[in-house]
Every structure is written in structure tokens, then in C-alpha cells.
Amino acid sequence: MTIFDGVRELLAEHAPDAVALEESFVGADARIALSVGQARGAVLVAAASAGVECAEYAPARVKQAVCGYGRADKGQIERMVKLVLRLDATPGTNHEADALAVAICHALAPPLLEVAG
């Protein structure tokens, strides 16, 4: 199964209102950047083909929304995700914590935009 097919199935099963992604961080390894870009593209195309709105957030904006500090470290993000979502334990991996942090950022974005005018 491809990423595109998997995302399409998840979208059909869960019918989300939106898909939120963190903007890519381009590090020193070009192969990883290319792979991440291809995966993100598959997610964006799957969401668009399902008519689901997509939003993208810079890593610093996600950290700011969740931790109040745009340069928060992974541990801070994990702890704040646990507190905000009232979880019994911190997420199992950094990837899970990051995904939940992006979801929190997206959930907070509309109220913040209204306050900003």
C-alpha cells in the first residue's frame, strides 16, 4: 500500500474536517528531505482529492502554540501535549508528540486569528 492509498483510506474512515501538517524542515541530508517531501506531497494530494482542507504550520509556530515558546525542545513539547490533552502518559514517540502538537496548533489557530483581528 502506498502513503497516498493509506491516507485516502484514513480520510474515508474518519472523515476529518481538515488535515494539518508541519512544514518541512530541510536538514543536511538531501535524501531524507526528498523522501519527506514526497510523503508530504502524497498526503496533500490525497486530502485534496477527498476535498479535505489542508493547513501547514511552521515548526516554530507549532512550538509557540503548544509551549508558548517557538524554540521549545522535544521534551517540552511532549510534556505540554500531555498536559493540554490530559493524557495519562507522554506520547510514545517524538513523532506522535509532534503530530499531536500540530493538531493542537491547528485547533487553536481560528481563535487566535479572531483575537488578532
Image: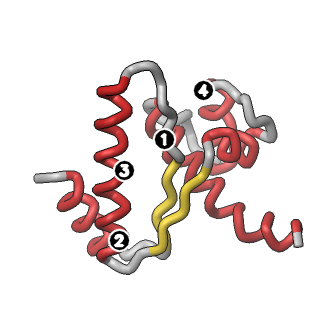
* N-terminal label among 4 and 1: 1
Q: Quadrant of residue 75?
A: top right
Q: Nearer the viewer, residue 29 or 72?
A: 29
User: Which residue is under mark 3?
Assistant: 40
User: Which residue is under mark 4?
Assistant: 74
Which marked residue is nearer to the observer: mark 2 or mark 1?
A: 1
Q: Residue at x 75, y 43 (%)?
A: 64
Looking at the rendered structure, the kind of residue marked 2 is His
In the rendered view, tell whether residue 57 sits above or below residue 7: above
Mark 2 element type: helix
Give the alpha-carbon distance from disc 2 to disc 3, as whole Å.
19 Å
* N-terminal label among 3 and 1: 1
Which marked residue is nearer to the observer: mark 2 or mark 4?
A: 4
Mark 4 element type: helix
Looking at the rendered structure, the kind of residue marked 3 is Arg
Looking at the rendered structure, the kind of residue marked 1 is Ser
Image location of residue 108, percent across then percent down: 71, 61
User: Which residue is under mark 2?
Assistant: 14
Give the alpha-carbon distance from disc 3 to disc 1, as whole Å.
8 Å
Q: Residue at x 72, y 70 (%)?
A: 110
User: Which residue is under mark 1?
Assistant: 24
| Mark 2–mark 1 CB contact (< 8 Å) | no
Which marked residue is nearer to the observer: mark 2 or mark 3?
A: 3
Give the alpha-carbon distance from disc 2 to disc 1, as whole Å.
25 Å
In the rendered view, tell whether residue 28 sits above or below residue 46: above
Q: Nearer the viewer, residue 92 or 20?
A: 20
